[in-house]
Image (cartoon, rainbow, N blue to C red):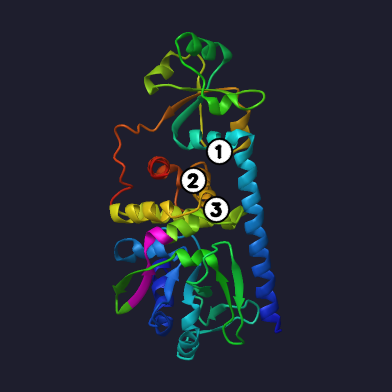
Amino acid sequence: MTRQIEVLTARARAARSQAAVRRWELRQLGHAAGAWHRLARLLTLTRRAWVISDEDAERLLAAGHHPEAAGLAFEPSRRFFLIREQQVASLSDAQEIALQASPELLGYRNLALVQFDEATEPIAIGPRL
Amino acid sequence: MLFRERLLGSLRAVQPVLDVKGVLVGGSQVPNLLEPEAAATLVVSQDVDLVVPVERHGEVKAALELLRDYSPSSDEPSVWIPRSANLLEVNFIGRDAALTVTAETYVFEDDRLPLLVFGLLSLLEEGSTLELLNLRVPLPRPAGLALEKLLTERGGLKGERDLLVALGLLLTSGATDLDELGAGFRALERGQKDAVLGNLSVLSLMKRLPEMPDPTRARDRVARLVRHLEDLG
């Protein structure tokens, strides 16, 4: 076997191993009743997010908002509220955060989320540029 | 020198290979070439992937003899190096339509042009031929390439790069491409569908990388695509 074929064979073996690891990772993410998948999905469908205080979270609860199951599945639980954008002004201490994967994103106890409006946006991805 | 000129110059230099039936440009240059007049503003990488059907390997090898501006790399199998810094490296990868297990990978052994053959590339279908400035560039249909990238098994920067290619395809796709993407998604196994949706989430929550398509500006499109694919099952 030439050195080049040896190199490629090693890469093919590595690619198959990587694929096996990724399948295992996906399976693990599907565990815990799919909590990680549900959290990722919730944040993917979210347009803007704010960190809110416990007091604001209690206010939203009192107003009839229910925290999303995706956050309650964690221990300690996270309270993620879906709100309308106009409601943000009524929250006393809301601080907008970037929706980017980070350890901090998982550390917030209370988040207010505004989702992309599925009812009013067309489904087509967009015109060819 | 503009990246577009380097890209088109590289493709011109490998035209004999591109003229072999079934050969496709793959990977990150496809969104660049799908832009109007191949504007190539969605730069993700500085090389060109050429997808070689294993059954056409002999014809591709013969075409390689016609290349004047490239020679095989002594270090990297399947990579051909340009003689000029104004051209991009070319990376040959193999496609075997008979591979039904998309996670499968094997080596097509050959002294002149060995290939890594990736099962995921079996998702590619021949699409349009870009004709521009006397160039004929065969491209894959965007939907199959997007699915291939969204099923990426890679982590780290390489995985992020693949997802940015998928983003570039979403930015240049139309309604027909979306329909094809949906049809391709429906045909996947459950685990693969989860992988596609999971990778769309990764893309949606990805930070912007310098001089790359900005994922934060396409989050709405990604969200709509996720809902659309979920509706399809």
Residue B187, compared with residue B227, is above or below; it is below
Residue B119: x and y in percent read: 54, 66
Q: Residue at x 29, y 76 (%)?
A: B133
Distance of label 2 from label 1 (alpha carbons) = 9 Å
- Is residue A66 or residue B84 the one in the foreground? A66
Tell me if label 1 and label 3 are in contact, CB under 8 Å: no
Report in which chain the residue with disc 1 lies: A
* Residue located beneath label 2 in the image: B197
Tell me if label 2 and label 3 are in contact, CB under 8 Å: no
- Amino acid type at circle 1 is His
Residue B160 - label? 3
Residue A128: x and y in percent read: 29, 55
Report in which chain the residue with disc 3 lies: B
- Is residue A105 or residue A25 the one in the foreground? A25
Q: Residue furthest top?
A: A62
- Amino acid type at circle 3 is Glu
Q: Residues within 10 Å of mark 3 (few under 14, many from 20)?
A: many
Q: Residue at x 65, y 74 (%)?
A: A8
Magenta-drawn segment: B136-144
Residue B83 - label? none
Q: Residues within 10 Å of mark 2 (few under 14, many from 20)?
A: many
Mark 1, secondary structure of its residue: helix
Mark 2, secondary structure of its residue: helix
Classify residue A39 as left or right of residue B137: right
Distance of label 1 from label 3 (alpha carbons) = 19 Å
- Amino acid type at circle 2 is Leu
Report in which chain the residue with disc 2 lies: B
